[in-house]
Amino acid sequence: WAVLVGADNDTFGTALTTALTDNTGEKPARFDTLDDLLTALTEGHPTPSTVLTTCPPPTTDTTPAHEEVRRVTTHTLHLLQHWLTDERLTNTQLVILTHHATATHDSENITSLPQAALTGLLRTAQAEHPHHFRLLDLDHHPTTLHAIPHTLTTTTEPHLAIRTGTPHTPRLTRTTTHPTLTTPHNDWRIERTGNGTLESLTLQPNPDANRPLTPGEVRITVRAAGLNFRDVVMALGMVPDDGHPALGEGAGIITETAPDVTHLHPGDRVMGLFGIGSTAITDHRMITTIPDHWTYTQAAGTPVVFLTAYYGLTHLAHAQPGETLLIHSAAGGVGQAALQLARHLNLTTYATAHPTKWDSLRQHNIPDTHIASSRTLDFENQFLTATNGHGVDIVLNSLAHEFIDASLRLMPNGGRFLEMGKTDLRDPHTI
């Protein structure tokens, strides 16, 4: 039922072969590489239902951990990509075996950082190609290897860990070891303490909640709030902290307005940009009233994506009716907002997204000829053909590297390239 690929002829490889030997004494076939297996299939070897493979062993004990992470993940990524190109393996599952790369409880230590990195890689692959790949993490207990056949044939769980012969699978549970986030007794707000983790986002007393309003300001009792991604990446140390308080999007009820604010009144339901806390003070130009049929939660999740898309298309790109727009990752938050604003601005829209999300683009009446994958560079030729070589006038970009180059080539007559990402910033003069 299974074959082994890359299981070295060491103690573990021998023990694994023994564990997978069936009741008749037939041992599983073993191949050094995936190419060797594919060659055997060409020569008539039956297609297995399951292929088990192990991570490549460490190069040396002195190799830096980050180099090992890169080597192991690169090797595995190439394996997954190669696997998906052969139609003979469509109905075969690839099971990747790791050792102590997953913690099944709080006191268990992860001893292999390179192999632990495969967890995220495999989960991404599983999301894009369901039922093709499985991850099985093992300990060194003698009963664990013998539990593999029963575990794989009696469950379809994509991620498993076997400890002392017993399978475990990840599940969300209520935490019992850490206290829940508690709010101060008085007015509070979210602040960043700057320790490089999400735990640096803490609830702190807000001494300014009841200060007198200055001209143009309103005071809001917050009912729902959304944490701006800006504060997440600053909390994680991915971009420098700008020193400004956490700025989210939210919804609530006005409790007070400055005398010069006459179009808003206490009791009005409003949404917009203001600090996250029990009470917020903001400029009246940063908020607007909530439609009657919206909940506070719906209202709190709307401002940032629409303001981002609107600012980019109108204030930066100066989009004009009849122009052509390419929206990358159009199934995301800003992308969905941009699709609606493009229709409002009477733009001709082209969009990329993962193929599994194309239906969400069709719901915005985007024709299939204007839809392409955000994971390949095929969009360049597809959209050049669809526009008879004219390309597009505006690109709303969230991709990087060669995808940026392909997008720039989609503007052969010039245009406006709007960059939302931070990972591959280009010099405008170079472009």
Image (spheres, rainbow, N blue to C red):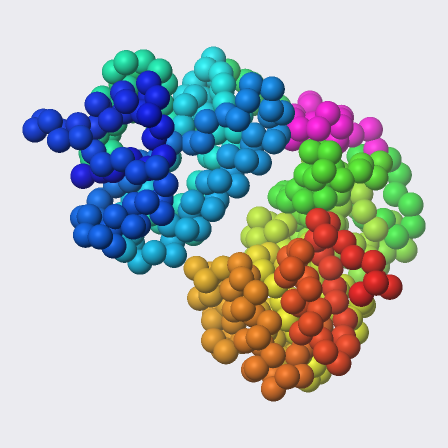
Rendering coords of residue 258 (x, y %): 87, 49
Q: Is residue 93 magenta?
A: no
Quarter of the view holding residue 207: top right
Residue at 46% x, 15% y is 108
Residue at 68% x, 39% y is 232
Q: Give the camera-side residue of 5 and 314.
A: 5
Residue 268 in sight in this render: no
Rendering coords of residue 314 (x, y %): 77, 70
Rendering coords of residue 369 (x, y %): 50, 78
Residue at the extreme bottom of the image, as rendered: 388
Q: Quadrant of the N terminus?
A: top left
Residue at 67% x, 77% y is 392
Residue numbers of the magenta segment:
183-208
Rendering coords of residue 279 (x, y %): 73, 38
- Left or right: residue 169 versus residue 115 is left
Residue 354 in sight in this render: yes
Is 347 situated above or below 417?
below
Q: Give the camera-side residue of 371 and 101.
A: 101
Q: Is residue 190 magenta?
A: yes
- Left or right: residue 430 versus residue 60 is right
